[in-house]
Image (tube, coloured by chain):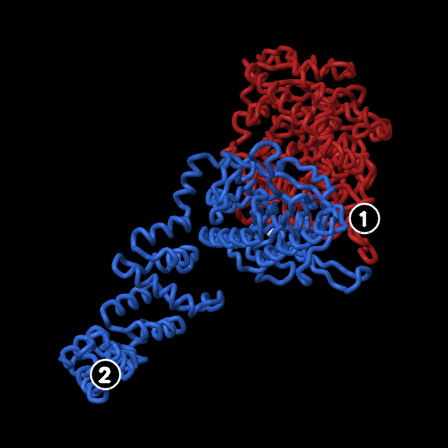
Chain colours: A blue, B red
Amino acid sequence: MTKIGLEIHCQLTNLESKLFCSCKANYREFQINENICPVCMGLPGSLPRLNQEAVKKGTMIAMALNCTTPDKIAFFRKNYFYPDLPKNFQITQLNIYGDTSIGGAGSIMVGDKKIRITRIQLEEDPGRLIYEGSSTKNQITLVDYNRAGTPLVEIVTEPDFENPKQVREFLNILSDLLENLAVADPSLEGAMRADANVSIEGGNKVEIKNIGSFHDLEKAVHFEITRQNSLHSRDITITQETRHWDDKRKITISSRSKEEELDYRYFLEGDIPWVKIDSEIQEKLKSKMPESISSKKERYISKYNIPSQVADVLSSDKFYSDLFDESHTENNAKEIANIITTDLMGLVDTREKLEKSKITATHLRDLADSIQSGKISRNSAKNALYEIVKTGNDLSQVISELDLGNVSDESELTGIIREIISEESQAVEQAKSNPQTINYLVGKVMQKTKGKADPKLTLDLLKKQIG
Amino acid sequence: MNLKISALEFVQEVQNGNISAEDFVAKTLERIQSIDDKLHAFLSINEDAVNQAQEIDRKVKSGDKVGVCFGMPISIKDNMCIKNSKTTCGSKMLENFVAPYDATVIRKLKQQDAIFVGKVNLDEFAMGLTTEFSAFGPSKNPWETDHVPGGSSGGSAVSVSAFECVASLGSDTGGSVRNPASFCSVVGFKPTYGLISRYGLVSYANSIEQIGPLTRTVKDTAFMLNIISGLDSNDNTTVDNKDENYLSGIDSGIEGKKIGIIKEMLGDGVDPAVLSATKDAISKLENLGATCEEISLDMVKYSVAAYYTITATEAGSNLARYDNLRYGYDFSVEGYEFNSYITKARQNFGPEVKRRMIIGGFVPSTGHAGKYFLKALKIKSKLTREINDAFKKFDLLIAPTVPILPFKIGEKIDDPIALFLVDINTVTANLTGKPAISVPFAVSNGLPIGIQLLADSMQDKLLLRAAHALENTVKLPEVPI
Ligand SMILES: [Zn+2]
């Protein structure tokens, strides 16, 4: 049986500052080596100053993944020399001297499969290495420390995955969960990185390091299983080793470094006292936690009778579910869910478009109410939505500017219907004998009014005219 | 101009207009000029000190608000950061390191109009007891210039003792303030762990070390502590002392206090002169109304071993950042690969630092941690339990600061084990986080002896009160320089 375990590094990109200083957690907008200070540069005499907000967010992630959360947590030093580490040690967490990491054992369901979480730890990201020069001989390494000290949570799973598909589903669930908690933006470059360990039936465990995105993680796992199966089929032993993911060639390569032999000499970080997170604090955090995706889905289905598939799509996206929760009322909930999942999501199908979108809850509410009262047809509503996303103008303004309002004036509509009746005598005869075919005539009226005729009124008037 | 006044006297004199800060600072610099060749307390001098003093005099004359230090000239151990000044840590590794920020203690002293006359000598990265491990050569004991001044804050103790400044800041990891204070006959204080912010103090063994003042009188120490103690958002290990005033009630004596005499600190190897001075101190404290009784702290006999294991582990990690890539000394990376470069660059560490880092790489490593590092931590917590129990019974504990008298430069430098035993009486306060102070008490054949008092955590005020009482029982000769 194939076994896959993951170690996921997730930057807490939504935090204001780094884990141990007041430099920005959002380092991406800075020039090289501009987002630094004595603390994150590890200058002589500087001391780490723990970001309490990171502790709260880390605890929330642990709770959302159903992990145990200890009463107090501690930080440790992981000692090794590397140019991206300003102090030549990383401040991190571990559980070898008791459960002192921010999250202990937990689990999450991926479909019917239970994936166990081993632990969650809070730690600092190192700097970023930039390699220049072609051959190994004249290669130079440049270091950008803007990233150094960015808060990370490392989520370690048990080797419970059996195939890349489960990995992908897990990553989707995890991304949605992190976004829902408003702790991270998984779409930012480098915000999610991972290591994976993979073994097939009868083979040794192989670690894959340095996978730079969730997208590549699934690919790397897939590649590695194929590689191992191919070796196995030729009776070649799969050696226990560490491999690196080459994101240009999309393959894993055996790493010659002796990384696995390093002794990190872990010991307690004395500059950061133990942090108390007692039950009172935990209860408070729990009450502040946003509603979980599964509970949202449940609510949408049971309260508003929204179809399960629509509820699924709606609840797993924080932006849209927030929009829904803000705009809907008891009466228009279903309509709004429809507008969001069938029209809006198609309109703003990329993140960029979403960020530029000017749509608000008020727009959605007006739109749904107008559809329900017959002021505007579904079709016109779609056009109005397109305009609103672009301009952010009020619905009433959009309707009048684009002349999207329904023709609900009885005499105007009667006139149009008379024209249709004279043009379509055959269809009129048919409708008289078979009332079902009257819809053809309704369609004709719609065509003539460019979809703006109030459908209910049209039907009533048609029936009256035909007699 | 009398340079031999205390910090509090200096403040009074300037405040009353009897002396000017400019005169005093200028005369202080002259004295440094004339005698420091012999003593080598200073590694660098603040060329702007006189101008800064002028500005304070101007403020005094015009009635502007002046900080409580009134231009008091202070020396700073060269392992604390002063913005735009060199902070060498007595090491070739940091020979050219200019700090881009102020340590918290420096910021607080600047706010109170203290003047830093210069940075003073220390054993490299504060690892040593004599200043002989300074990469820039040893300091000399002003009482006997061919003797060591103690360490690692040797430059601090020498500069205060020889009137090259009014007060100094040192750091104490295993006795580094108290030991040189004892050897040079000045007051040296290590506060409760967390009472003074370490932000800007270059770490050696961060879990046990503290910054501490070296002064001429106990009252001066209380005065300095009032300025530099308290919570600091830049140091998560600081404790809230609720703006305690350590000078108030310092004269109220020790009548009725119970004092424990630590048996293990008066054992084999104690110099007879040190032993008799200690007995004298005990009887004087009894005369003041205290009751003294012997107490045994069994773990003290393992304390030095535990101390070196823990400090080496932390030092190995704390000093790992000195790879010369981001700051340090002039040595190009051209032609080197990362590992070969840092191996070469780190050869600029001195022998004692290398020795401790090698130990620090070994004792916490996989397969050895259980035998060494974790065992040392066990001793640390057992010792803490023992001393906590002792403080249920006693208000204070007493022992000589150093069991032996100052020795000659070069006499023990090649015998690390002999040097390590000099620590036996001081490391307990660091391992347990308790406050401790060395009070000048006797001079034997021209060599000073200090008496150490310890108190329970956050009882720093009581400790200073007792030290002040003890200090008042003796009149000591003046330094012969
Ligand atoms: Zn920073």
Q: Amino acid at mark 2?
A: Ala
Residue topped by disc 2: A427
Q: Label 2, label 1: how many angstroms apart (C-alpha)?
A: 95 Å
In the depicted view, which residue is nearer to us: A381 or B169? Answer: A381
Tell which tag, 2 or 1, sits nearer the viewer.
Answer: 2
The reply, left or right, for residue A218 in relation to residue A175 is right
Q: Amino acid at mark 1?
A: Ala
- Secondary structure state at the residue bearing disc 1: helix
In the image, is residue A114 above or below residue B415? below
| Letter of the chain that mark 1 sits on in the rendering | B
Work out which quarter of the rendered image holds the N terminus of chain A and state it: top right
Please name the residue shown 34% across and 61% down the image.
Answer: A337
2 and 1 marks in contact (CB < 8 Å):
no
* Residue A353 visible in the snapshot: yes
Work out which quarter of the rendered image holds the C terminus of chain A and state it: bottom left
In the depicted view, which residue is nearer to us: A410 or B161? Answer: A410
In the image, is residue B370 above or below residue B268? below
Q: Position of residue B35 (x, y in %)?
A: 80, 38
* Residue B476 visible in the snapshot: no
The reply, left or right, for residue B286 in relation to residue A393 is right
In the image, is residue A340 above or below residue B78? below
Please name the residue shown 52% across and 31% down the image.
Answer: B245
Mark 1, other Cα within 10 Å: few <14 / some 14–19 / many ≥20: many
Please tell me if label 2 and label 1 are on a single chain: no
Say which mark, if any, is on residue B345.
1
Q: Position of residue B206 (x, y in %)?
A: 65, 36
In the depicted view, which residue is nearer to us: A90 or A313? Answer: A313
Q: Position of residue B399 (x, y in %)?
A: 68, 18
The reply, left or right, for residue A60 in relation to residue B39 is left
Mark 2, other Cα within 10 Å: few <14 / some 14–19 / many ≥20: some
